[in-house]
């Protein structure tokens, strides 16, 4: 069973509110610094990019290095002016992409 | 490996079916003895130490399973003359973590190791050069302090082979230079002023604690059908209601096995006897199930049987085990969690037994893994250079029952989150 | 961390010899140089004002594997004046880069939280730049705790 990303953000807000968004992505974030039991370097494999968009517009993004801890945690803010959908995209070294979406009602 | 026969899942449920129809499931099951696979071991055999743990053989020293340590010397060693040693070398040795600590784990020692987070289990030695101690006394205290104090926490650095005589001479030479209080770079380096860590994280917040993923995993495993076609859900279709208090009553003396059974071993033996699945201790499945079964009883105060004859005898054994000196470092549970409780071992705060059980299994941030209490016991031994036992060792059961009794009344909060 | 601030050391002329005399090891020297280069690339060589950036980190991290970090830049986030990017570097890590965060007016606030890996006790430096070309910076020392028995 693959663990699911965790997301925490309000389902409702008032126009102009700045809301807090918390995200947790299960990932070992293999830094490329570790060696296996035979002394060989374990190749780097990390989530290197995170993007948050709202109704298709960029809100916040981050370029991540191996110094970001395993199970990358990102918390940030978003100002909401209208109802719509947040889209979260994590990109792994090698190009694999994981996405998630959450709706919010703004009155 | 598990051997022997087991009652098929269908038969197990048939046994319960009659009472299930007659009364609420939880009450019915409480009256019945849980099915258990009584044959075989509950963890891998031969037991192999985890990869990444120090691979040294510690069979020359006591473990919780056997006595092996050579007796302490009866007399201090006589030295031929005054000690000449290299104080600069000694300064490096006392701060060398690869030598089982070393000295800075428990002592402030002036500027040794840059006075970087030394511990305070034992006296501050920053002015021992002015204390009027004979060379021979200093040598012997480092070589084997038991000749002066039979119950000392001090590891036998010489007689247990951590330092050679020449190195102890260097250490003594260094100690003789210590004549001024340590100067700490920041107040945090001073163990007397360092604030005790307070765990503030919300361990049940799934975004704070990656250990909560084990709950999700267990909920899937709960419904996973074995090759015989049964799952936990076959008999326990409402875990939230049915296991509201169970884990808080564990561990328990199990007369059928003549040992104390913790949740993890119970999961192995009960699953084998019912669904037929093999979930040995220290597998991901077993750990996830242990997290989940404790999680379902969160908020419930720990209340274990300490009154039955079996429990009483097990606790008495647990008390004795907690006092046994283990490993090359020659330490007992009561050393770190009694004498050193509420003190710093280097940069780590030592807790009392009370408060050390209610959050297991716990997520460990330094290892990105869930640890159950048995793996915690195993590391305690290996960390002080003693051999661990297999996780289902009866000695660990005795120790766990004793530890649970010291945590009586504390409310479960699992999975925990710790370093 | 070692007596002289990095800035002061660089002000001395940043020659290898000068920094070695101060007592920096070669690896610390290399890390400080790489950190300085990364920051210069981010700011375009512009001098960062030591203000407006607040950083939260534990004084003693329980281990180097996961250390909670949060930062906040006290600056407007309007369409014509907002924080565009914030870079975090760990001076004492084998590779100093930790992350670069990109903000928009839709972010509402120029702040974020994450968890980072630290190889050793060190300074964490946060540098922020705005759409108006201003650059701010702040830094904080984190001690990574030392374990008890050595194993």
Image (cartoon, rainbow, N blue to C red):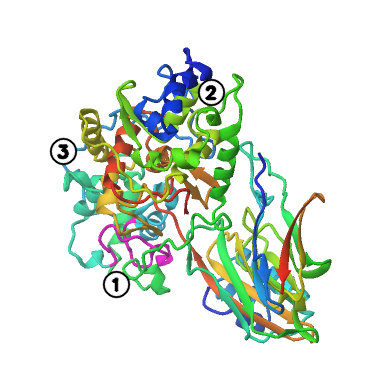
Whether residue B118 is in magenta: the answer is yes
Instruction: Please identify, in this view, whether the residue under mark 2 or under mark 1 is nearer the observer.
Output: 2
Dot 2 alpha-carbon crowd within 10 angstroms: few under 14, some 14 to 19, many 20 or more? many
**Is residue A87 left or right of C145 when viewed as pictured?**
right
Give coordinates of residue B154: x percent, y percent: 27, 49
Pointer 1 indicates a residue of which chain?
A: B
Residue in front for this viewpoint, B333 or B152 = B333
**Magenta stretch, residue numbers:** B106-126
With B16 as the anchor, is C130 left or right in this view?
right
Q: Which residue is mark 1?
A: B180
User: Residue A107 at what x, y percent from top left?
Assistant: 71, 74
Tell me what residue is drawn at x 42 percent, y 34 percent: B26
Image quarter of residue B19: top left
Residue B74, numbered circle: 3
Q: Is residue B156 visible?
A: no
Q: Position of residue B310 (x, y in %)?
A: 24, 28
**Separation (CA) of disc 3 from disc 2:** 58 Å
Q: Residue at x 64, y 47 (%)?
A: A34
From the viewer's perspective, tell me whether residue B291 is left or right of residue B156.
right
Determine if marks 3 and 2 fall on one subunit.
yes
Q: Is residue C78 left or right of residue B77?
A: right
Assign a secondary structure to mark 3: loop
Separation (CA) of disc 2 from disc 1: 68 Å
Mark 3 or mark 2: which comes first in sequence?
3
Q: Is residue C42 visible?
A: yes
On the image, the x and y values in percent for residue C138 come to 61, 79
Which residue in the structure is indicated by mark 2?
B275
Neighbours of disc 3 within 10 Å: few (<14), some (14-19), many (20+): few
Have a look at marks 2 and 1 and say if they share a chain: yes
């Amino acid at each position: 069973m693959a663990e699911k990303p965790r997301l925490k953000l309000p389902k409702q807000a008032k126009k102009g509110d700045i809301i807090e968004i918390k995200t947790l992505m299960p990932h070992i974030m293999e830094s490329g610094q570790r060696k296996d039991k035979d002394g060989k370097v374990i190749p780097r494999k990390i989530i290197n990019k995170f993007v948050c968009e709202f109704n298709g517009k960029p809100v916040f993004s981050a370029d991540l290095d191996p110094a970001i801890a395993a199970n990358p945690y990102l918390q940030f803010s978003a100002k909401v002016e209208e109802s719509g959908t947040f889209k979260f995209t994590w990109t792994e070294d090698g190009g694999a992409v994981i996405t998630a979406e959450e709706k919010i009602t703004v009155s | 490996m598990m051997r022997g026969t087991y009652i098929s899942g269908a038969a197990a449920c048939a046994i319960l079916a009659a009472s299930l129809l007659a009364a609420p499931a939880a009450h019915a099951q409480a009256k019945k003895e849980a099915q258990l696979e009584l044959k075989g071991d509950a963890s891998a055999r031969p037991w192999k130490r985890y990869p990444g743990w120090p691979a040294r053989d510690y069979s020359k020293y006591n473990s919780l399973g056997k006595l092996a340590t050579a007796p302490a010397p009866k007399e201090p060693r006589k030295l031929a003359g005054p000690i000449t040693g290299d104080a600069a070398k000694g300064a490096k040795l006392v701060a060398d973590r690869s030598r089982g600590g070393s000295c800075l784990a428990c002592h402030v020692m002036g500027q040794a190791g840059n006075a970087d987070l030394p511990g305070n289990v034992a006296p501050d030695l920053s002015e021992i050069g002015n204390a009027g101690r004979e060379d021979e006394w200093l040598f012997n205290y480092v070589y084997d302090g038991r000749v002066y104090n039979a119950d000392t926490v001090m590891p036998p650095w010489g007689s247990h082979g951590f330092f050679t005589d020449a190195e102890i001479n260097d250490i003594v030479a260094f100690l003789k230079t210590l004549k001024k209080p340590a100067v700490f770079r920041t107040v945090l380096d001073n163990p007397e002023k360092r604030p005790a860590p307070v765990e503030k994280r919300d361990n049940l917040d799934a975004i704070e604690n990656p250990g909560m993923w084990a709950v999700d995993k267990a909920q899937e495993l709960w419904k996973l059908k074995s090759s015989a076609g049964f799952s936990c859900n076959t008999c326990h279709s409402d875990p939230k209601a049915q296991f509201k208090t169970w884990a808080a009553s564990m561990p328990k003396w199990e007369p059928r096995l003549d040992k104390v059974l913790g949740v993890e071993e119970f999961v192995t033996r009960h699953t084998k006897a019912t669904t037929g699945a093999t979930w040995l201790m220290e597998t991901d499945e077993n750990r996830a199930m242990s997290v989940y079964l404790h999680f379902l009883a969160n908020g419930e105060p720990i209340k274990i049987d300490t009154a039955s004859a079996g429990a009483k005898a097990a606790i008495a054994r647990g008390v004795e085990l907690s006092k046994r000196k283990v490993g090359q470092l020659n330490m007992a549970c009561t050393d770190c969690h009694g004498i050193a409780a509420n003190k710093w071992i280097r940069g780590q705060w030592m807790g009392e037994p009370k408060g050390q059980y209610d959050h297991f299994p716990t997520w460990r941030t330094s290892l990105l893994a869930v640890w159950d209490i048995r793996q915690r016991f195993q590391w305690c031994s290996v960390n002080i250079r003693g051999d661990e036992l297999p996780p289902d060792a009866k000695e660990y059961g005795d120790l766990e029952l004793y530890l649970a009794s010291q945590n009586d009344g504390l409310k479960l909060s699992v999975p925990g989150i710790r370093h | 961390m070692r007596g002289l601030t990095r800035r002061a050391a660089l002000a001395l002329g940043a020659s290898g010899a000068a920094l070695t005399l101060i007592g920096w090891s070669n690896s610390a020297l290399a890390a400080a140089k790489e950190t300085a280069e990364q920051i210069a690339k981010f700011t375009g060589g512009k001098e960062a004002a030591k203000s407006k950036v607040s950083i939260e980190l534990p004084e003693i991290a329980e281990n180097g594997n996961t250390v909670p970090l949060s930062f906040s830049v006290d600056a407007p986030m309007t369409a014509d004046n907002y924080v565009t990017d914030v870079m975090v570097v760990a001076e004492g890590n084998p590779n100093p880069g930790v992350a670069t965060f990109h903000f928009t007016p839709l972010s509402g606030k120029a702040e974020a939280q994450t968890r980072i890996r630290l190889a050793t006790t060190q300074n964490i430096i946060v540098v922020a730049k705005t759409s108006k070309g201003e650059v701010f910076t702040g830094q904080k020392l984190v001690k990574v705790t030392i374990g008890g028995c050595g194993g």
